[in-house]
Image (cartoon, helix red, strand yellow):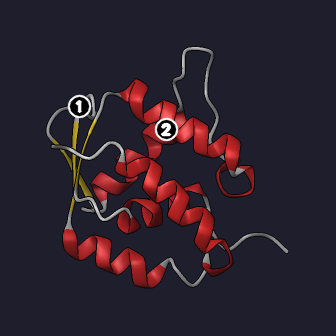
Amino acid sequence: MTNQYSYLDVLALALANSGVLAFTGDSKQWSAVVREMRDKYPELLSGIWFSERDYSEQLEDFFRVMARAGVLSFANPRYERIDMAPDAAAHIRTSAVQALKEHTDAIRDIADSLATLEHK
């Protein structure tokens, strides 16, 4: 049986559960956090790959998909300020949580790691 979720769902739910609506950090910081969580939770984030220079096409795709869906907005193209729409966060928490219910602790840990990128 295949998973009913992808890394897109995991990252979206983790962002929504982080308690943060404004994030900051350059692409290297985002890559470092996501790579650490991918290594810790490969069963959830194995679809994300990184080049030797810490570039991830999948992470770029995540940001692009979330922006097109109106979930995230960016202050600039380098992702140094990312805002999450409150309504979108609430919707993600209710829609994605069922598919990932057996991974609640891992999602919380990923959310806590992403919250370190909170815009202050």
Q: Is residue 107 left or right of residue 94?
A: right
The kind of secondary structure element at disc 1 is loop
Where is residue 103 drawn, in percent x and y?
65, 71
Three-letter residue code for mark 1? Pro
Three-letter residue code for mark 2? Val
Residue placed furthest toward the top: 53
User: Dot 2, crowdedness within 10 Å: few (<14), some or many (≥20)?
Assistant: some
Q: Is residue 78 left or right of residue 1?
A: left
Quick one: 67 or 92, which is closer to the camera? 92
Q: Name the quarter where the C terminus is drawn.
A: top left
The kind of secondary structure element at disc 2 is helix
Check the image and report above or below for 55 versus 105. above
Quick one: 41 or 94, which is closer to the camera? 41
Residue placed furthest toward the right: 1
Tell me which numbered mark, 1 or 2, is placed earlier along the sequence: 2
Quick one: 25 or 2, which is closer to the camera? 25
Residue at image coords 20%, 44%:
119
Q: Are marks 1 and 2 in contact (CB under 8 Å)?
A: no
Where is residue 12 drawn, in percent x and y?
43, 61
Q: Which residue is mark 2?
A: 33
How far apart marks 1 and 2 lie (CA) works out to 19 Å
Where is residue 81 drawn, in percent x and y?
20, 39
Q: Name the quarter where the N terminus is drawn.
A: bottom right
Check the image and report above or below for 68 versus 37. below
Check the image and report above or below for 13 versus 43. below
Q: For residue 77, which numbered disc appears in the image?
A: 1
Residue at image coords 58%, 55%:
7
